[in-house]
Image: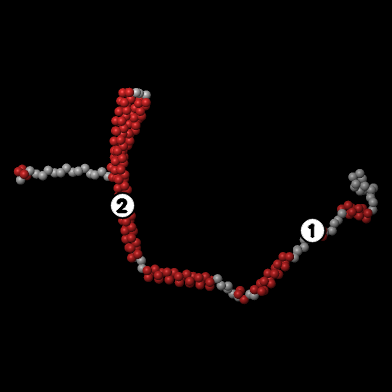
């Protein structure tokens, strides 16, 4: 049958569509190329205007016609640049919208997974058990406070001591601090003895004796 009617031709697969970023980059490159051409035309037009100032008659008209032709081309490039700029703006806006949608999808997926995990964890917890645990901890803390109070009590008959007696004893200790202790080493309380007077008195008691040139007593002969 295929030989009689022939077989259907397979359609060629279309090339994959360009991404929005690729399209925007392509338009940006084309817009830059047009801007370069416009700048070149502006230079040529300025040169022709200078020649028009320095020319007259047919030469001036010829330069004028050339300048007008360049201006027409410049207007065409300006129009193309405007169209490409608007298209690139639309593509960039679509790309921004797509990025926002992808970000939103990522956030929603994360929130769903988090909510699922939280639900599983809450199912493993029993509120009544948590409440009972809190009550047990509260009771143990109260028992610990009571035990500390018991351990802090005074042992023996220390509670029977009168506070007035303690205050009187404290006042007595302060009176003792005001009393001055005698200083037996003070020079004013010690008798002063003059060595010269002692020697004189001894000489007087022993009688005057003859002495040599050095002041020593001379032995009796």
Q: Where is residue 28, by image quadrant?
A: top left
Q: Position of residue 80 (x, y in %)?
A: 29, 38
Q: Residue 187, position in %: x, y?
A: 81, 57
Q: Which quadrant: the N terminus?
A: top left
Indicate left or right for 164 with 41 as reference. Answer: right
Q: How many marks?
A: 2
Q: Element type at marker 2?
A: helix
Q: Residue at x 94, y 50 (%)?
A: 209
Question: Relative to residue 117, is residue 218 depicted above or below?
Answer: above
Select label 1 or label 2 by which is in front: 2
Spatial CA span between label 1 and label 2: 102 Å
Q: Which residue is mark 1?
A: 186
**Which residue is pictured at 61% across the width and 74% down the height?**
158
Q: Residues within 10 Å of mark 1 (few under 14, many from 20)?
A: few
State the scheme by which the image is colored. Answer: secondary structure
Q: Where is residue 192 drawn, in percent x and y?
A: 85, 56
Query: Which quadrant holds residue 43?
Result: top left
Q: At 43% across and 71% down in the image, what residue appears?
A: 135
Q: Horizontally, is 104 left or right of 218 in the view?
A: left
Label 2 CA crowd tier, 10 Å (few <14, some 14–19, many 20+): few
Camera-nearest residue between 21 and 42: 42
Task: Give the residue pinned by disc 2.
Answer: 101
């Amino acid at each position: 049958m295929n030989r009689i009617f022939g077989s259907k031709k397979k359609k060629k697969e279309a090339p994959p569509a360009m991404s929005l970023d690729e399209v925007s980059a392509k338009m940006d490159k084309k817009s830059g190329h047009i801007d370069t051409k416009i700048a070149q035309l502006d230079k040529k037009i300025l040169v022709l205007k200078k020649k028009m100032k320095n020319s007259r008659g047919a030469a001036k008209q010829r330069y004028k016609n050339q300048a007008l032709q360049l201006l027409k081309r410049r207007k065409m490039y300006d129009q193309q640049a405007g169209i490409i700029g608007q298209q690139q703006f639309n593509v960039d806006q679509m790309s921004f919208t797509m990025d926002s949608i992808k970000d939103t999808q990522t956030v929603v997926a994360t929130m769903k997974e988090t909510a699922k995990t939280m639900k599983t964890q809450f199912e493993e917890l029993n509120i009544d058990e948590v409440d009972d645990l809190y009550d047990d901890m509260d009771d143990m803390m109260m028992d610990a406070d009571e035990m500390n109070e018991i351990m802090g009590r005074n042992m023996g008959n220390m509670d029977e001591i009168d506070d007035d007696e303690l205050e009187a004893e404290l006042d007595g200790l302060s009176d003792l601090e005001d009393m001055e202790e005698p200083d037996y080493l003070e020079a004013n309380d010690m008798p002063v003895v003059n060595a010269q007077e002692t020697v004189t008195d001894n000489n007087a008691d022993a009688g005057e004796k003859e002495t040599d040139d050095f002041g020593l007593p001379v032995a009796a002969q």
